[in-house]
Image (cartoon, rainbow, N blue to C red):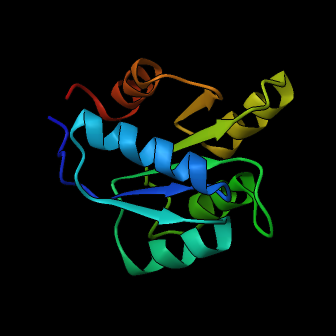
Amino acid sequence: MVDMKMPILIVDDYRTMLRIVHNLLAKLGFTDIDEASDGSQALAMMKGRDYGLVISDWNMQPMTGFELLKSVRADQHLKATPFIMVTAESKVENVVAARQAGVNNYIIKPFSAAVLKAKLKTVLGEF
């Protein structure tokens, strides 16, 4: 069973997107949601707290979601953290690169609450 109180970190440089994903997660019943505005801030936050899931945008500066994913997977303490990449890019090579880097799932923008829930279920299990 999924712990609805587990800490979740959402990462996006676009405030509106952070708010949308935050609200969708809250509607699904998750209660502990942190936000970061880029990969380097997210990585620093992950070193200070154990997150049950990271949902990150791909395109951010100075550290992209893809670079964040690679850093998380290279870190002994963080590498098991479930990671979902969100992007407007549907290029096959991006999906392949993210898969090879160890992403657990991939969501293409724009997406609905139903899509987010389905992706969360494949990564976390039923809730």
Query: Relative to 93, is 118 above or below?
Result: above
Location of residue 3 with respect to 64 vertically, above or below: above
* Residue at the far front in the pictured view: 16
Quadrant where the C terminus is found in the figure? top left
Residue 101 appears in which quarter of the rendering?
A: top right
Q: Which residue is at a point 44% across and 28% down the rendered structure image?
A: 116
Tally the numbered discs.
0
Compared to residue 116, the image places residue 59 above or below, namely below
Quarter of the image that includes the N terminus:
top left
Name the residue at 76% across, 66% down.
Answer: 63
Residue 14 vs residue 66, the one in the foreground: 14
From the top left corner, tell me how far across and down residue 14 is, in percent.
66, 54
Residue 121 in the image, given as x and y percentages of width and height = 34, 26
Residue at (21% x, 39% y) in the render: 29
The residue shown at (19%, 45%) is 4
| Quarter of the view holding residue 52 | bottom left
Front one among 87 and 84: 87
In the image: residue 94, left or right of residue 1: right
User: Residue 94, how many percent across, how many down?
Assistant: 80, 33
| Left or right of residue 34, residue 71 in this image | right
- Given residues 75 and 29, the one toward you in this image is 29
